[in-house]
Image (cartoon, coloured by chain):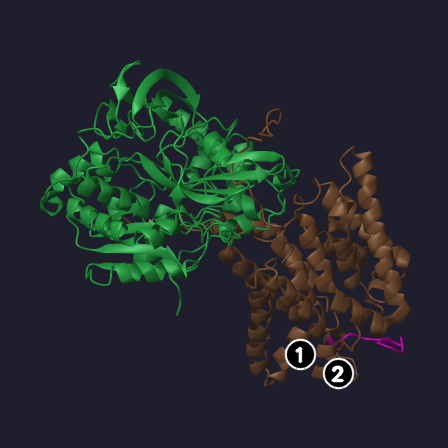
Amino acid sequence: MRKLTFRGGIHVPGHKEQTCNLASQPAIVPDRVYIPLSQHTGAPCSPLVQVGDAVKKGQKIGEGKGFVTSPIHASVSGKVIALEKREQPGGNFVFCLVIENDKKEEWDEAVKAPANPGGFTPEELRKIVFEAGIVGLGGAAFPSHVKYSPVEGKKADVIILNGVECEPYITADHRLMLEKPDRITAGLNYIMKSVNCSQGVIAIEDNKQDAIAVMEKATAQEKNIRVVVLQEKYPQGSEKQLIYACTGREVPVGGLPLDVGVVVNNVGTAAAIADAVELGIPLIERVLTLNGAVNKPANYRVRIGTLFKDIIAASGGYTGETGKILAGGPMMGKTLYNDEVPVVKGTSGILILKKEDVRSEKEQHCVRCAKCVDGCPAFLEPTTLVKLAKKELWEEAENNDLLSCIECGSCVYVCPAHIPLLQYIRRAKQAVQAARAKAKK
Amino acid sequence: MNNQNNLLVVSSSPHVHSADSVQSAMRDVQIALIPALFVALYFFRFSAALVIVACVLSAVISEAATQKLMKKEVTVKDGSAVVTGLLLAFCLPPAISPWIAAIGAAVAIVLVKQFFGGLGCNIFNPALIGRAFLVAAWPVAMTTWVSPLDGITTATPLGIIKEGLQQELPSLGQMFLGNVGGCLGETSALALLLGGLYLIYKGHVDWRIPVSYIGSVFVLTAVIGAFQGQGLSYPVFHILAGGLFLGAFFMATDWVTSPITKKGRIIFGLGCGCLTVLIRLKGGYPEGVCYSILLMNTLTPLIDRYTKERVFGRVKKHA
């Protein structure tokens, strides 16, 4: 049978065998957590507590203005001891509320299970999702309630749960599907209800046969939900490629999934929604994979705000000389300046690369092999964009659909001339976006 | 913690890379040329070895020397000069003077490759310009052929047809194996096919170019042959004769000088095929592979420009 997939893309060694069979375990709950005021796409939060205030686990401690934002919650009980700027997994600096953990694990009174979770209306469900601070856990951290809110003239007819996890080394979603298939299924049902949509799809790559079996079993009684098996290929988990593979629909350039009647969520997001709706628990913990050059690679359930340093130390520390610390996987992950960075809602993994594995080959001239063209899942010509970017011909780059680049890095991976194509493309994108912003003024 | 004084590397994603490099790709091309190399050494013996060594040495030395003189980094280690030398040798007559061959290789490297900016910047296939230069400069030496094994002066199968010589044509089986007169690396379709398939398997060559090139030669000659009352052996003769397999698998597929779009590669191959047949049947030369590829090289930028892929999501808005 021909497996479902998209056109283009590349094959990258998965490196998942080290952690895919390790059950997720509670990570160390540190003495201090650092909870950033902005962990999501949209308006940042303002603190609702002051330095010196006592807070309880699950208590809302920050909220933002407007519609596209997401509140933050204390992940431990204790005392707020500082508000300080700190580096984030994305590389930027954000104010964080520092909470000294009193180790009492006292829940906030607001956290309680509702009597009848099945009776919520779509509006009530969206309110719960918003209040629980739920954002996309796949990495983009887009506030979920926004995705579920009706848009004039657009109607979603299918919800896709993304269980693809095409990033090498990361097995967090894989473990979650194995361990909490019922939470994921329940979450999907709540999402379908809140969007008023009757069809649900759980998409999984064929390298996770055990997860496919478990999810199929968990959804056997759900006649509106089906598990879709996709070919193992990078970047299969990229939203637009995923939608195409599952439904054959192409999200138009500059458009959103809703334009083709689809809403996509990560499997982890669905599980978090089930916890929020049925138990009243806000998003204060997530599953992530710690992998690479550490003594004990593992899948952890980590409190939001735990420093990378604490998790790594609790895993037996680094092995060898560390070259790179990545928030996320090796294809799209961001490099960090140090390990004193908090886990945020969008952190799916921590990957440590040894110094000897960090290669920096000299860039050669393009030999026009077109491997980047063949590999680009957006059907762009990366080499052409780079040639334009080198000459700073931003407008022409824009006319060559520069902004359609999804920054998956496939072109760089396959380039025999070791050209950092994506770096040039990012620079061009920044220039084009700056020019657009200027034109608007 | 053992990272106290260790500075971390901060860079743009991705953070892993395939094992592919220009060097490894050039090595694969060299591997792919080995079957044809053995066939050349078997059929044309010492004279073939001499020409091959002369071309490769001249290509490597002239590349290093030019880059030194132009105060550029010397990049002979990437193996591309070796490939150019090999490919030029493969499209030269086996009995040619090694000196002439060496001059051809120097022209290919200096004039066509380095003067245009080095690997990746040349417009034309260097080996083919090297050959074209030699045809112009030493027309007699470039058209003096010897038969395999015994080294007696002979004519190529295409030459026999073109000149209407009273000489028996070799069998198609002989042509497939390479037991015919011709350039030293072009005679064995079998050996070249093996190498070509290896490159396709390795992902360095897009099947579209050889298939559309050889396919169009086959179809065109089949149609023309049918009008002349010839059978199927006529198009088979044409795809096995001359330098078609060498050109289709190793010259027309040169990364630098062929289109980067898939559609473009088909057009490129079709163009090469049509021009080859045109030159063979109506032109002044018996063989047209070299010039047809060079002519199509000039069209590569234009083909790329007009065969751009529809970007993902550039769909017609549904009403």
On the image, the x and y values in percent for residue A320 come to 63, 37
**Please, what is the three-letter code of the amino acid marked with disc 1?**
Phe
Q: Which residue is mark 2?
A: B169
- The answer to if A441 sits in the magenta stretch is no
The chain under label 2 reads B
Q: Is residue A239 left or right of residue B268?
A: left
Could you tell me which secondary element the residue under label 1 belongs to? helix
Q: Is residue B163 above or below residue B27?
A: below
Quadrant into which the N terminus of chain A falls: bottom left
Residue A316 appears in the figure? yes
Residue in the picture at 53% in, 48% down: A372
Q: Is residue B43 left or right of residue A430?
A: right
Q: Which residues are magenta?
A: B147-157
**Residues under numbered marks 2 and 1 in contact, where contact means CB atoms less than 8 Å apart:** yes
Residue under disc 2 on the same chain as residue under disc 1: yes
The chain under label 1 reads B
Classify mark 2: residues with Cα within 10 Å, few (<14), some (14-19) or many (20+): some
Q: Is residue A311 left or right of residue B316?
A: right
Quadrant of res A114: top left
State the residue in front, A296 or A285.
Answer: A296
Q: Which chain is green?
A: A
Could you tell me which secondary element the residue under label 2 belongs to? loop
Classify mark 1: residues with Cα within 10 Å, few (<14), some (14-19) or many (20+): many
**Please, what is the three-letter code of the amino acid marked with disc 2?**
Leu
Q: Is residue A334 above or below residue A410?
A: above
- The answer to if B154 sits in the magenta stretch is yes
Q: Which residue is mark 1?
A: B237
Quadrant of res B100: bottom right
State the residue in front, A148 or B319.
Answer: A148
On the image, the x and y values in percent for residue A50 come to 28, 14
